[in-house]
Amino acid sequence: MKIERLTVGVYAANCYIIYCEDTKEGIVIDPGEEGDRILKRIEELNLDVKYIILTHGHGDHIGGLKEVKEGTQAPILIHEGDRELLNDGTKNLSSVMATGSVQLEADRFVKDGEELSFGNYLVKIIHTPGHTPGGISINIDSSLFTGDTLFAGSIGRTDFPGGSYEQIINSIKEKLVLFSDDTIVYPGHGPSSTIGREKVSNPFIIR
């Protein structure tokens, strides 16, 4: 499995292009702004994108969604808890961002524990509310894509509408830290980490 990270937009959100080298099938996680740049890389890699998966519906993670959807024709997947965010440019905050208001519909909604596949790989959806009601993390092999739930040394904000500090801590402590210590954490912003490192150094986990 190959993982490419593109840091996009003024909020430096991480968009991930993940693909199977054998089949050239892949997925895109969080195409936040710079949709043309994301599409260009997909075309350079000659990928068949099976899904566009959103860890949550905030504007900095969906700003390039329209372009990537049109360019790949891949279905947009999000948890139903964030349906209203995706549909409303004010609620998803895109109306005050450089991309302008983003209002789109998901092709379908994913659920906690749901499994998808691309190429030779299995994708598991983990509902991790707290940053948003429908926030998810995505597990593929020994990699965990945590959106704005868990960062290297920190956690996502919970002061936006629908956010909950109690929920985000529960999501991390009851779900994410149960993964093996060598699981690589790929967050929605900032550098990667590991579950083991976060368990001993992240102040929100060890307190």
Image: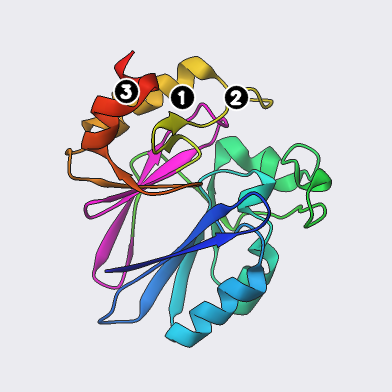
**Position in image of residue 187 (x %, y %):** 43, 46
User: Residue at (68%, 71%) from the top-left corner?
Assistant: 67
The residue that label 3 is drawn on is: 173
Label 2 vs 1, first from the N-terminus: 2
Rendered location of residue 52, percent (x, y): 52, 62
Q: In the rendering, at what x and y percent does residue 28 appear? A: 48, 64
125 is higher (above) or lower (below) than 38: above
Mainly helix, strand or loop, the magenta region?
Answer: strand
Instruction: Residue under label 1, please give it.
Output: 168
- Disc 3, SS: helix
Q: Amino acid at mark 1?
A: Ile
Colouring scheme applied when the structure was drawn: rainbow
Badge 2 is on which residue? 163
Q: Amino acid at mark 2?
A: Gly
Mark 2 Cα shell of 10 Å, populated few (<14), some (14-19), many (≥20): some
Q: Position of residue 93 (x, y in %)?
A: 75, 41
Q: Which residues are magenta?
A: 117-146
Residue 53 in the image: above or below residue 172: below
Q: Residues at badges 2 and 1 in contact (C-beta under 8 Å)?
A: yes
Quarter of the view holding residue 206? top left
Report helix, strand or loop for mark 1: helix
Dot 2: what SS? loop
State which tag comes first along the sequence, 3 or 1.
1
